[in-house]
Amino acid sequence: MSVGIRFDGDELAGREGQTIAGILLANGRRTWRDAAGAERGIFCGIGICQDCVLTVNGVEGVRACQRTACDGDVIEREGRS
């Protein structure tokens, strides 16, 4: 079964059970956050580094590598200094 998410206004498709990071990577998105003037994406992949945090359905600080994507999720970049 497929899952559809919206990331920065773009519709992206993934598979049921994939993490948000998995769907972003599968759709060619390598970075999705700005921090200290540099682009960030997935780094550790296990939720420790927090480089992959996003805003999901209005909730800030969601780790994309740990959150399973749900059909209809609205995901936005986060900027941190």
Image (cartoon, rainbow, N blue to C red):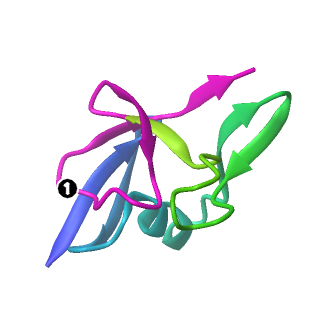
For the N terminus, the quadrant is bottom left
Magenta-drawn segment: 56-81
Up-down relation of residue 31 to residue 58 (above or below): below
Residue pointed to by mark 1 = 70
**Farthest residue in the top direction?**
81
**Farthest residue in the right direction?**
37
x%, y% of residue 72? 19, 47
Q: Amino acid at mark 1?
A: Cys
Residue depicted at 46% across the width and 69% down the height: 22
Up-down relation of residue 34 to residue 63 (above or below): above
Residue 41 part of the magenta segment: no
Residue 4, quarter of the rendered image:
bottom left
Residue depicted at 86% across the width and 28% down the height: 37
Tell me the SS state at disc 1.
Answer: loop
Please give left or right for residue 37 compared with residue 17 in the image.
right
Disc count in the image? 1
Residue depicted at 75% across the width and 20% down the height: 81
x%, y% of residue 23? 42, 66
Residue nearest the viewer, comparing 29 with 63: 63
Residue depicted at 60% across the width and 58% down the height: 29
Mark 1 neighbour class, 10 Å CA radius: few under 14, some 14 to 19, many 20 or more: some
